[in-house]
Image: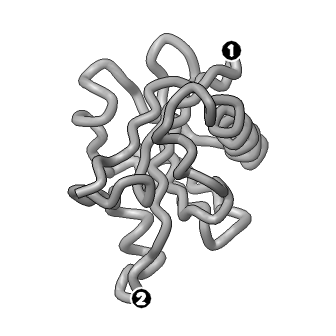
Amino acid sequence: MAMSVVKAQSEKQIILSDKVNLKIELADNYRRTPLSHDEVKLADSLVARYLLDNHDKYSWTKKVDDYYDYYRQYAGYIAGSKMVFINAFRHKPDTFTDEFLHETLVSARGGGSSFFTIKVNIQSMVCSDLRVNAPK
């Protein structure tokens, strides 16, 4: 069953199609669920705050300097609680269309802080599993 698509409010916000396979990122025990504008906004604010609060704790988060400069792909899912998976990348090649970004999880080998993923528990408002790519 296809989910209704929430149109993002910014060109840097992309809601992933429910057809995108996230087993590698989320394991097998998840079920996709739609996200509201408010949930996307909440997830963004929690991640931005998490990155700022942890700059001193982890040296690699210092390089993620402005969360809102990143393109962000979102997937809502249920894994016990309502969660948001965010895939963030700094630059979008001109060849990446809106449709491509909606239907394809962007990934790269290396790239350092230009690429990262994070999970947000919407119910408890907690961020987890921040993964920043290796430099090369």
Residue 17 visible somewhere in the drawing? no
Residue type for callout 2: Asp
**Marks 2/1: CA–CA distance:** 37 Å
Residue 124 badge: 1
Measured from the top left, where is residue 102 in percent x and y?
44, 64
Measured from the top left, where is residue 129 in percent x and y?
44, 26
Relative to 87, is 122 above or below? Answer: above
Q: In terms of secondary structure, where does tag 1 sit?
A: loop
- Crowding around mark 2 (Cα neighbors within 10 Å: few <14, some 14 to 19, many 20+) is few
Residue at 58% x, 29% y: name it: 120
Residue type for callout 1: Ser
Relative to 1, is 9 above or below? Answer: below
Whether residue 82 sits left or right of residue 59 in the image: it is right
Q: Is the N terminus in the top left, top right, bottom left or bottom right quadrant? A: top left
Residue 94 badge: 2
Judge by depth and name the residue closer to the eye, 107 or 30. 107
Residue at 33% x, 51% y: name it: 19
